[in-house]
Image: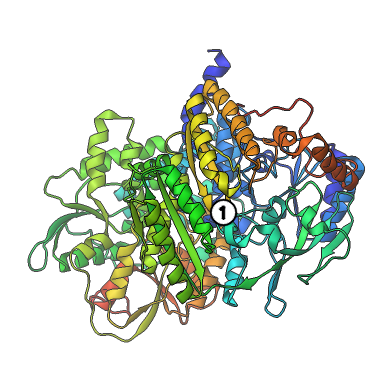
Amino acid sequence: MKPEEQQLAALRSELNYDKTNKCVQCGYCLPACPTYLTMGVETHSPRGRINLVKMAGEGKIKDLSVLEEPLDLCLGCRACETVCPTGVEYGAILESARAAITRRKTFTVPQKAMRNLLFKKVFPSRKAMNLIGNAMWVYEKSGVQKLARKSGLMKKLPAHLGEFEKITPPAVAPAQRASLPAFTPAKGERKYTVAMFVGCVMDAMFRRINQLSVQLLAEVGCDVIVVENQTCCGALHAHTGELDESKNLAKKNILAFARNDVDFIVNNAGGCGAMMVEYDHLLADEPEWAERAEQFVKKTKDISQVLVLCGGIQGEKRSAERVTYQRSCHMTNVQKVTEEPVSLLKNLSNVDLIEMNNANMCCGSAGIYNIVNYDASMEILDHKMKDVKETETTTIVTTNPGCLLQMKLGIEREKMGDRVRAVHLIEYLAERSGMINAADQSLS
Amino acid sequence: MTEGHIKEIRDIVKTGQVLTKESDRFSYSFDASFGTYLPDVVIQTKSVEELAALVKFANREKIPVYPRGQGTSLSGGPLPVKGGMVIDLSVMDDLLEVDEEDLVAIVSPGVLTADIHKAAEKKGLMYPPDPSSSHVSTIGGNLAENSGGPRGLKYGVTKDYVIGLELITPEGEIIRTGGKTVKNVTGYDLTKLVVGSEGTLGIITKAILRLIPKPPASETVMAIFDSLVDAGRAISMILTSGILPSKMELMDQASMTAVENYKPSGLPTDAEALILIELDGHPAAIRDEAEQVRHVCQKIGAREVRVPQTKEEKEEVWKARKLVSPAIVRVKPTKISEDATVPRSKIPEMCRRLQEIKEKYQIHLVVFGHVGDGNLHPNIIADKSDKEEMARVEKAVAEIFEAAVQLGGTLSGEHGIGVMKAPFMEMELGAAGLDMMKRIKQAWDPNNIMNPGKIFPEPGQKLVLSE
């Protein structure tokens, strides 16, 4: 082979080029893609993005930076995979292409330092995340704002920070912020032993939801273990092209959760769950990890699955309420968990679940997409809120922290905070079963 | 194109977008068929006046103009094979009016076909053409390509439902053809000429579509045959017994095997053919017809005949048919989807010829499709990186076309000619027939700016599938 052919062959394998050939360009993904609907150009559609990667792999596009904006503006919701008739692995193509672009990018020294700090020190460290604590770390000026400014990812950020601050979860009292207990016994007869995955964002910003998760799991008959040394799932890393670091985190989690006495590894964040159920793909080319990853994946469950397995939550007789459910894209399209949250909600007495139109459409949160691509995200959110409004419900239930914040932001934008609220499914189940009081949002 | 051209285009397009970035140009360089052709510029605007001005400008400067819907074409209709401008008409999606009194729908070209179905159904009406991509394809694309679909057997194709158009001619004039009446014999029927002209005669900016009352009920019959020839005989016998089904679909052994390997659906992989028949109309009438169909199939020697009762059972049966397309590409990545069509009576003979071609060239050929109207879909599954295989595929495709034409059929039932099939036009039309078409094109488009490179073969053009 000539040197340039060799180079192209190397690029092809780096880009997952072979996977792009599965795309027959039928266009069935177009109506499912939120950014195609809002931006209206093929460049921001799954078919368009796959084609760009293919063109780079074939040497027709010489400069990978041509791909950068279209790939950056992808939410990674993967709704296209669910509707794809030929089973194109869009997520894998997206991540490898983003990683290839990141590798070729020359970050300035401060950019490098910031990326290193965030991706290698902050997200993975429970200690660091604890320090940041109940502050809105990711939306804070000290964190992503600086990264965004210095990396030039986003120029408008400071103007919008105020909006994000409004939706910051209320500070949790120090007593309640205590670490989760290492062991919580099942109430009554033990059905399963589960290990709780606490996550980084969930642990820092939504520890109360983690606490309620443990309580609900115990309530339905699970011994709940919180293992030491668990870390961030690595999703934010993978989505921003830091693929090597996400592999490291995956390995740490696999080691931390490698316990024979655990039936399930339970998470309550659609995005984290989606990352973890793909650890086997992530580590497929590392033989010494492949089998362990498979074991880990087999045990990984969303909390709604385990609650349903244990017979569900009965709920007390409470006042009638109309709710709607905003699905987590990663739960629907990657974990393929779609029935359980719905059945949990439908089982609650006096709760009327009203499905919105385009229920499977992304809300535009997508990790930190709403911060780095604010305008694009808000346009998607506005579409979503139109569908939400039509349901005339008073509670929006979500299953992922990003979606939860985005729904709160949507409620703020539509100025309907006086009559509509957004909650995590776990909070809602806890509330309807009398575990917490809806009015003061505190543990009862 | 020059910088000056782009500047002039930007001056014309005041309300829309002019895209020139490399990422945008590559994103409009393909459709669902073969090949990548880079346009110089991509234009989106909802304004008919701006579009007309653009076409006038292009005509003056002799710049190729390529109208495009959502790029689901299987024949290369929107491919900008000579560069120039791609006009993305999918943005013109604002107009969708259903007029119950006149039984028509008035639509702009970017409206999705499925949205027309929905709007008509809301008023108890139906727009029958139903290409399988109708949830993605635009009506503009359907009109340009004269799309069909499974219901073609009973209800015909797109052209049978178009009674009026608004069109920008290749010289930039805005004209109207036909109107809102079913009967109209004033002058030449330009409506029918434009529908199916694959964007070579102008840009459709509005259409008036005929609607019919929606049939109140449907029944499905599924029959399994040990022999493909028997299945063909059963189809002929049903159609001569006074019954006109709304759909008749065939799956051969290879397609059933592919589905079973992909998502097991309980299909009989040891049988040679499965046919699916849908009847629609008054519930009492179609119940009776379903019994007649069952009787005919049994008489011919069907191994099994099933009439699913519930809505769920019916959906289950049709699901397997829908799985064929995705299932076959799991075998190999490249799908060459042909739609050679033969008179109904020649279906068994065409099936036999396809079998011969498959063996002669050692290709992976799957046959399924809308068998009731003779519109078979011989699909060749290959790997485009295998040059030697693709050379065999090219020869096989040419022979499929020859077989269809020899049997009194046509190169294309519903996908269109586009780029790939252009070299075979003369074989079907004859030199004089093709020349008459060329003269029409020259009269409409003297500077050959509308979708150049399509339908008519270039001197010496041959079928090329290997890139």
| Left or right: A422 in relation to B64 | left
Residue B2: image x %, image y %? Answer: 85, 36
Residue at (69% x, 50% y) in the render: B145
Q: Is residue A352 above or below residue B171?
A: below
Residue at disc 1, secondary structure: loop
Q: Residue furthest right?
A: B60
Classify residue B127 by image quadrant: bottom right
Residue A156: image x %, image y %? Answer: 61, 55
Residue B345 visible in rendering: yes
Residue at (47% x, 55% y) in the render: A366
Q: Which residue is mark 1?
A: B133
Give the amino acid at mark 1. Answer: Ser
Residue A53: image x %, image y %? Answer: 55, 36
Residue A143 visible in rendering: no
B420 or B156, nearer to the observer: B156
| Left or right: A351 in relation to B121 | left
- Chain letter belonging to callout 1: B
Residue B107: image x %, image y %? Answer: 71, 66
